[in-house]
Amino acid sequence: MIKRILVWDIPTRVFHWLQALSFAAAYLTAFSERMRNYHVALGYILLGLLVFRLLWGFVGTRYARFSSFLFNPKEVVAYLLSMFRGRAAHYLGHNPAGSVSVWLLLALGMFICVTGVMALQDDASDLVVDLHGVSTDIMLAVIVLHLTGVLVSSIMHRENLVRAMFTGCKSSGQDEGIQRSYGWLGVAMVAAVIIFWFVYVKRPLG
Ligand code: HEM
C-alpha cells in the first residue's frame, strides 16, 4: 500500500532553503561596495549553516546522514546508465547521481565561505580573492546541474521532489520513513540566523 512517509527532517529542510536563499542574496550583494556588510553577513550565515549540515550529516536522521548518500563511482555510473535506459531505481533519499551534486554543492559552499573569510583579511592575496570568485562561478554551474537533476528525477519517477523538500514527505510502498522531524531544531536555526543578522548588520562599525 502506498502511503506518505517522512523523509526529510525539518533541520535538513531549513538548512536547504536558508542555504539557497543566503547564497542567492550573497551573490546579488557581491558586486557593490555599499552592500559589502550584507554580503559578509550572508556569507557568515552560509558558513554557519554548512557547519551545522556537516554535524547533522553524522548525527541527523536516516536520509540526512552522509552514510545514506555515500556512493562509489561505480554505483554513480551504473545509476546514470540505468537512467538513460529509463530503468533507474527509486531512492527515498538522494540518488547516486543527485548525491554527486549534493557533495559538490556542500564542498564548494564551504570553499567559497572559507576563501571569503580569508579575503576579508588585510593581507589577503589576489589568489584568495580570485579563488573566491572562480569557485562562485563553478557553484553557479553546479546549481544549474542540481536543478536539472531535480527536474529530470521528478519527471522520471513522477514525484515532486521540490514539494518534498518543503513538506519532508514522499509517497512510498516501503515503510521506511523517519520517526522524528526535530521541529524545535529547525526553529532554533531560524532564530539563530535572524538574531545573527541583526546583531552583525547593526553592529557599530569602527
Ligand atoms: C529554487 C532553487 C532550488 C530548488 C528548487 C532545489 C531543490 C532541491 C531538492 C528537491 C533537493 C532534494 C533532492 C533529492 O531529493 O535528492 C535539493 C537538495 C539539495 N540542494 Fe537544492 N534546490 C534549489 C537551490 C539550491 C541552491 C541554490 C543550493 C546551494 C547553494 C542547493 C543545494 C542543495 C543541497 C546541498 C542539497 C542536499 C540537501 C541535504 O541533504 O542537506 N539547492 N534541492
Image: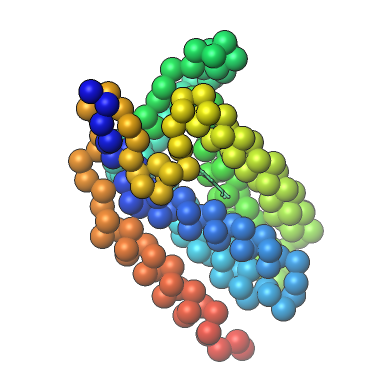
Asked whether 26 or 3 is in front, the reply is 3
Is residue 100 at all visible to an observer of this figure? no
Residue 66 at x, y percent in the picture: 40, 35
The answer to whether 81 appears left or right of 164 in the picture is right
Residue 102 at x, y percent in the picture: 52, 38
- Residue at 33 percent across and 58 percent down: it is 186
Q: Residue furthest right?
A: 126
Q: Quadrant of the C terminus?
A: bottom right
Is residue 102 at all visible to an observer of this figure? yes
Against 27, residue 107 (above or below) is: above
Against 56, residue 83 (above or below) is: above
The answer to whether 3 appears left or right of 77 in the picture is left
Against 63, residue 201 (above or below) is: below
The answer to whether 96 appears left or right of 14 in the picture is right
- Residue at 59 percent across and 57 percent down: it is 23
Residue 188 at x, y percent in the picture: 32, 64
Asked whether 173 or 7 is in front, the reply is 173
| Coloration mode | rainbow
Q: Quadrant of the N terminus?
A: top left
- Residue at 57 percent across and 10 percent down: it is 85
